[in-house]
Image (tube, coloured by chain):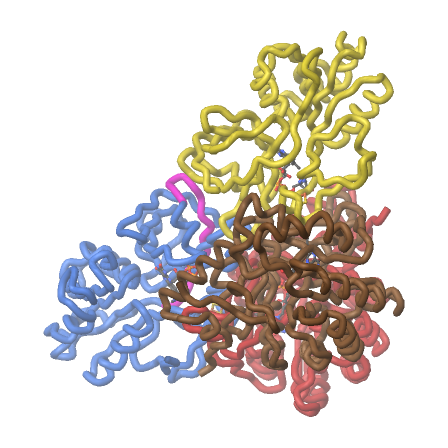
Chain colours: A yellow, B blue, C brown, D red
Amino acid sequence: MKSKIASNREVKRGYFRMEFEFSGDAEPGQFVMLKVAEHNDPLLRRPMSIAGIENGVMSVIFKAVGRGTALPAEKRSGDYIDVIGPFGSIFSPPQTGTVLLVGGGIGVAPLLFWTRRNPSRMAAAFIGGASENDILCSDGFSEVHIATENGSLGRKGLVTAPLVDHPAYRDKTGYLLACGPTGMLKAIDQLAAKDGLRGELSLEERMGCGFGVCLGCVCDTTGGRKRMCVEGPVFKTGEVLWRI
Amino acid sequence: MKSKIASNREVKRGYFRMEFEFSGDAEPGQFVMLKVAEHNDPLLRRPMSIAGIENGVMSVIFKAVGRGTALPAEKRSGDYIDVIGPFGSIFSPPQTGTVLLVGGGIGVAPLLFWTRRNPSRMAAAFIGGASENDILCSDGFSEVHIATENGSLGRKGLVTAPLVDHPAYRDKTGYLLACGPTGMLKAIDQLAAKDGLRGELSLEERMGCGFGVCLGCVCDTTGGRKRMCVEGPVFKTGEVLWRI
Amino acid sequence: MADLRVRIGALELKNPILSASGTFGYGLEFSRMMDIGKIGAFCTKGLSLKPRSGNQMPRICETPSGMINSIGLENVGIDAFETEKLPAIRQTGATVIANFFGDTEADYVQVARRLAAMEGVHALEMNVSCPNVDKGGIEFGGDPVFLEKLTAMIKKVAGVKPLIVKLSPNVADIRPFAAAVENGGGDAISAINTLKGMSIDVKTRRPKIKRVFGGLSGPAIKPVALKMVYECVKTVKIPVIGIGGIATLDDALEFLIAGATAVQVGTMNFVEPSICQRLAEELNAFCERENIIRVTDLIGTLRQD
Amino acid sequence: MADLRVRIGALELKNPILSASGTFGYGLEFSRMMDIGKIGAFCTKGLSLKPRSGNQMPRICETPSGMINSIGLENVGIDAFETEKLPAIRQTGATVIANFFGDTEADYVQVARRLAAMEGVHALEMNVSCPNVDKGGIEFGGDPVFLEKLTAMIKKVAGVKPLIVKLSPNVADIRPFAAAVENGGGDAISAINTLKGMSIDVKTRRPKIKRVFGGLSGPAIKPVALKMVYECVKTVKIPVIGIGGIATLDDALEFLIAGATAVQVGTMNFVEPSICQRLAEELNAFCERENIIRVTDLIGTLRQD
Ligand SMILES: Cc1cc2nc3c(=O)[nH]c(=O)nc-3n(C[C@H](O)[C@H](O)[C@H](O)COP(=O)(O)OP(=O)(O)OC[C@H]3O[C@@H](n4cnc5c(N)ncnc54)[C@H](O)[C@@H]3O)c2cc1C
Ligand SMILES: Cc1cc2nc3c(=O)[nH]c(=O)nc-3n(C[C@H](O)[C@H](O)[C@H](O)COP(=O)(O)OP(=O)(O)OC[C@H]3O[C@@H](n4cnc5c(N)ncnc54)[C@H](O)[C@@H]3O)c2cc1C
Ligand SMILES: Cc1cc2nc3c(=O)[nH]c(=O)nc-3n(C[C@H](O)[C@H](O)[C@H](O)COP(=O)(O)O)c2cc1C
Ligand SMILES: Cc1cc2nc3c(=O)[nH]c(=O)nc-3n(C[C@H](O)[C@H](O)[C@H](O)COP(=O)(O)O)c2cc1C
Ligand code: FES
Ligand code: FES
């Protein structure tokens, strides 16, 4: 589906927030597949978490890292981008209690969407990144704790440090919603197991199609082999059998 | 060489005139090779006749017909385009006498360049195309005769009709410089032979490299097999052994 | 409306645009995004006697104008296919070509016999690019003598349902393999399966595919596919179904002009899920515009004057 | 500055970035656009005993991330190469690998003997993807037994100059061919030459290449090339030079990590004439950044844990 781009701004060095027209709805945790070239190279679409959808305008946040994100980064308002979706499973925390949102780098995108959809929920956000430049959209959360690896913003170190200090973590009432690099997710999964918290993790994997037919994105879980794009990207803590 | 685009305007429906920074000089008849994709598809550069170069700004005129011209058509001022060249042989009419410039469609580009470089030469231009929309830059010539196949501008029919009526053609003193579709060039070559005129033709062929190494652009001439990109694209009338 | 019907053995297809095995799931995944009854047919993910969980991850990676996959023939198995997928597929009115494979000759025969008996399976497509466990891992499709024998065995159990044999491009010369299928009684040939390829992640210095080698598909392979399909067409009289890198109507037309009776679209289903339906519509528009009354009048019209 | 030197037989190359035959002319065409003395070596257009005018037009066409060529081995012949090209090439300080071929065995021997005697030719690269006129057009490189014999014959006349044998990818299994070169005494293998492909102009319904089939090259074929190079590396002890679709430093690194001693850049010379020089510079910067003191420490470091 060709979608008209409303805006595409470089929000931090190398990070872009793109807004485009989108008819239909989506739920927090889901993603869309963006076509990133006019011709055949790069060939495959790239999955992008939905960072929000309001009044027929969807937003995504992406980092220009490689071949597939170079072209989207050059798009301007008025240009078109080909988008299909939404695809994938959704965040579904219990109706009550504090939600602990943990985002690494561009992993904040689905958390931002969830927060917008649930403005009155008690929630605390923990945003981590390599440096100040990698902390995105932290102003989108009411309670926010920041950690950077080089200490250039917030606490120095990993995002798990402020997380485990939070009262709702310490008293085990908090429910985790986490999205970010695989290493971070695995660490959180192990912490949650050790400390007896529950929650959900949004995983990343190379995707060929995004809608369940190429079988290129499987991951092993306690419930058997699952497709990250259909049964995921959101899995419960304790469900994923970590490959690495 | 990445060149900054000064402007890119759709001068007629589907026809673009692009101007970009270019250091170095070039001669009328020569061409440059434009890179038309960021990645590998379309892979090969496309040859474009130089339509002018002044104060470090080069211009080309192109028709958006296929895969290779779609991307250049989308470029805007401030964007970059990768250009190498100039390549190829040049127009070299004798110092005196009337020059008869014959251009079909985007074939006017090198004729325009020649005219700008030789403003005081006695010259008449004959511009042809399918319809009014395909007549480009006719205001760049002081004496100009237009023919369109559907009669929507100028004389109805082929450009060769006004050409053979011109006094300098009839008295055989005119020297031909022609650029356009192969069919037109072949017709002019045959006319020139029949009527005893001399001149030069700028040919088109698929090009792999543009600078003589792929051997993908050869054509047979009275002087043997020649590379269109090095010994051409400009050949003398009577020199080309027409393939089709 | 041009007449787009083509025949593969006893089966008449609405039009010659099919979707390729392994790129269209069991069809149902697509019914939300297109009308799968509007295309000539779809080929199921390759089916085996027992369900398979396939290879370790990572299984896919992107390459210039292409991709490599090493899914390892993960599938639900013929039992689940029959009970869980087929009833829903029948509802859609789609024409179904069941792609299948085995580890042994006996496997192949058993799977083919079962599929041939299933209502709603309209034709069989035999994938012979799999290692033969009985013969120490040599591919079933790697030896023309053996391929002819296997084809004949399967033809016997396929009954009235057309048997399509899908050829591997990883051979020096595809023509003897095409001839083997014809001689073995196969109703049609489909070609090509993926080319063997490899890719390395230079950051980790590891193969991008866990199993090191995988199958290359997508627009990158189209010229190789077209050449092999043309060679098959020149070798046999049975229909040839062209596969490999089809992304546009022009690509499909290239195969038809070269003599393919139909085409299959593979990898591009991932990029544009409704591509097969679009190409079928565009093919109709093309035929109308060019005054081609029957699409069969287009097939094999390559000019070489 | 990292130590980028690699050895091919008795020849030491400044660095492992070479340019491939048929894509670099006789080197001189490039000296206006880059310093051809800065790259490891360049391979000349394939040379034959007599000059050749090559195939009819059209000879090239573009494909997704690739191109097809059917130049037909047009070249100036060894005499003109020696008298008209070589003196000027020697001035540039470039390392020259003379690519050559013949129609018959006797041709091959004669051309190799002449090239081996030329000052300024540093190594020979034998192209065996050409039809053998004596054997009814079967490719010289199509039969391992014959390839071993041919290699041994040429090695005898090549003297001290390294003999590189360039393999065709249009085989079912490249390993026996690699072994044949090693057994025949070849100093190195280069792989791959182009894949056979075809393309049709749907407007005219004619093949886009006059000779119908041509050779596919460019980024599209990189995964196939890498897989075959890796197989060669695993089969022989002599150096393997990786060729096929190299467009970026990462591409070159993939081949080196897979075990190639050097690489050749082909088609991309057309798109970026100074690419080989750039890649050589980038390779140096990469090694410095990664603390790789000798590029040979990078070669064959594929991890599979
Ligand atoms: C469900 C899901 C949601 C995603 N949401 C977002 C998002 O909101 N914003 C965003 O910027 N990206 C997101 N991604 C990742 C995104 O799809 C791209 O993979 C990533 O942007 C790199 O694309 P590229 O083509 O530029 O990089 P490539 O050129 O493909 O690769 C460049 C480098 O990045 C590495 N890489 C590629 N893909 C991934 C990946 N998926 N995970 C880790 N490393 C990778 C490659 O190995 C390579 O080293 C998401 C992925 C998934 C599966
Ligand atoms: C010396 C030289 C100078 C040129 N100068 C100009 C110029 O000033 N302006 C301009 O617009 N074009 C010029 N061309 C042609 C140009 O290089 C492209 O080939 C053309 O614009 C089509 O590009 P494409 O990639 O969009 O089309 P493609 O997608 O490659 O092809 C689209 C259609 O056009 C046909 N086609 C492709 N290339 C050619 C060709 N060279 N001649 C005839 N038909 C072709 C194809 O067969 C196909 O049917 C020149 C060519 C040469 C050799
Ligand atoms: C992810 C993936 C899975 C595939 N699985 C199968 C399969 O199960 N059986 C089969 O015969 N071919 C399989 N193929 C091959 C395709 O059906 C097709 O032959 C090949 O991809 C070439 O076509 P394309 O270039 O249009 O993709 C698979 C291809 C891909 C990309
Ligand atoms: C136009 C062209 C001409 C070629 N001529 C020759 C040749 O004369 N001899 C040879 O051994 N290989 C020849 N090749 C093959 C290349 O050297 C190289 O093996 C092949 O193109 C794959 O590399 P690439 O993908 O980097 O282009 C030619 C390739 C092209 C594109
Ligand atoms: S990305 Fe294709 S099945 Fe998940
Ligand atoms: S275009 Fe390559 S030799 Fe002329």
At horizontal 36% and vertical 81% (from top left) the residue drawn is: B242
Residue B37 magenta-highlighted: no
| Residue D127, above or below D108 | above
How far across and how far down the image is residue D281, in percent?
A: 65, 50
Which range of residues does the magenta coloring cover?
B75-89
x then y, percent, for residue C23:
64, 53
Quadrant of the picture in which ligand 5 is shown: top right
In the image, taking residue A18 as reference, residue B130 lies left or right, namely left
Furthest-left residue in view?
Answer: B167
Residue D40 shows in the view: no
The answer to whether any part of residue C109 appears in the image is yes
Image location of residue B223, percent across then percent down: 40, 83
Which residue is located at x 71 percent, y 47 percent? Answer: A216
Q: Quadrant of residue D255?
A: bottom right
Q: Is residue A235 left or right of residue B29?
A: right
Residues A165 and B237: in front is A165
- Residue at image coords 63%, 12%: A121
Residue C81 relative to residue B244: left or right: right
Q: Is residue A100 above or below residue D133?
A: above
Magenta span has B85? Answer: yes
Residue at the image point whose x is 46% and y is 53% from the top: B36
Q: Residue A47 at x, y = what percent?
A: 61, 38
